[in-house]
Amino acid sequence: MPQAGEEGGANNLMDRFSKTLLAAAAESGLATITLSRHMPSLRRSISNDDEVVVLAHCVRPDGQVSGDHLMLLTRNRLVVSKQSKVLNRVRVEIEAAMTELEDVRWAADPQLPGVELAFNAGGDRHRFWIDAAHGKHMWRLDALLAKQFRRPSAAAASLASHARGFA
């Protein structure tokens, strides 16, 4: 019988999405019941080989708090699902490829702690507050968002290195 990590073992039963989702869920401290409610809706939007960057419970800071939101950010997509308070139905509220996101901005707030994330998708401006359990988690979210959204183009990186005298 194969062991975990060997051909046909337990590690091969999980795709990249599932493996990285479990790690992101553990890091976020998300309740298992919340994840299990939202997962079918989120799963339909993400391919098996995509890697989860951030999974977080979030709210809309602009007063639209009429439901429970879950944000899933992968290397290729951003998906936000919402569970209605009245009927407890989960639906995808935002689904966009990374290339479709425009004017992405975020601000970490150490006083609360948490991160406000804003972006344009589908012609609309969206804003979310991601609550962090503590300052370390807030800075981790900030670093993950920076890595995901601030990738300099090859031309800009080349120009920067030339300006510094590295070329």
Image (tube, rainbow, N blue to C red):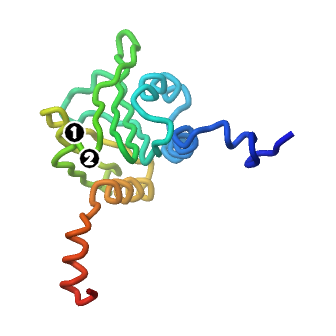
* Marker disc for residue 68: none
Q: Which residue is disc 1 drawn over?
A: 127
Question: Which element type, helix, strand or loop, lies under badge 1?
Answer: strand
- At x 17%, y 40%, the residue is 120
Q: Which residue is disc 2 drawn over?
A: 116
Bin the neighbour count of mark 2 within 10 Å (Cα to Cα): few under 14, some 14-19, many 20 and up: some
Viewer can see residue 29: no
Question: Which element type, helix, strand or loop, lies under badge 2?
Answer: strand
Q: Position of residue 14 (x, y in %)?
A: 62, 38
- At x 38%, y 55%, the residue is 144
Image quadrant where residue 146 sits: bottom left
Q: Quadrant of the N terminus?
A: top right
Q: Position of residue 121 (x, y in %)?
A: 19, 36
Asked if 123 appears above or below 24 in the picture, the reply is above
As drawn, which residue projects farthest toward the top?
87
- At x 36%, y 44%, the residue is 76
Kind of residue at badge 1: Arg
Image quadrant where residue 157 sits: bottom left
Kind of residue at badge 2: Glu
Cβ atoms under marks 1 and 2 closer than 8 Å: yes
Mark 1 → mark 2, Cα distance in angstroms: 7 Å
Asked if 137 appears above or below 127 in the picture, the reply is below
As drawn, which residue projects farthest toward the left?
123
Q: Position of residue 66 (x, y in %)?
A: 28, 21
Q: Tell me which numbered mark, 1 or 2, is placed earlier along the sequence.
A: 2
Locate residue 67 relative to residue 160 in the image: left or right.
Answer: right
Bin the neighbour count of mark 1 within 10 Å (Cα to Cα): few under 14, some 14-19, many 20 and up: many
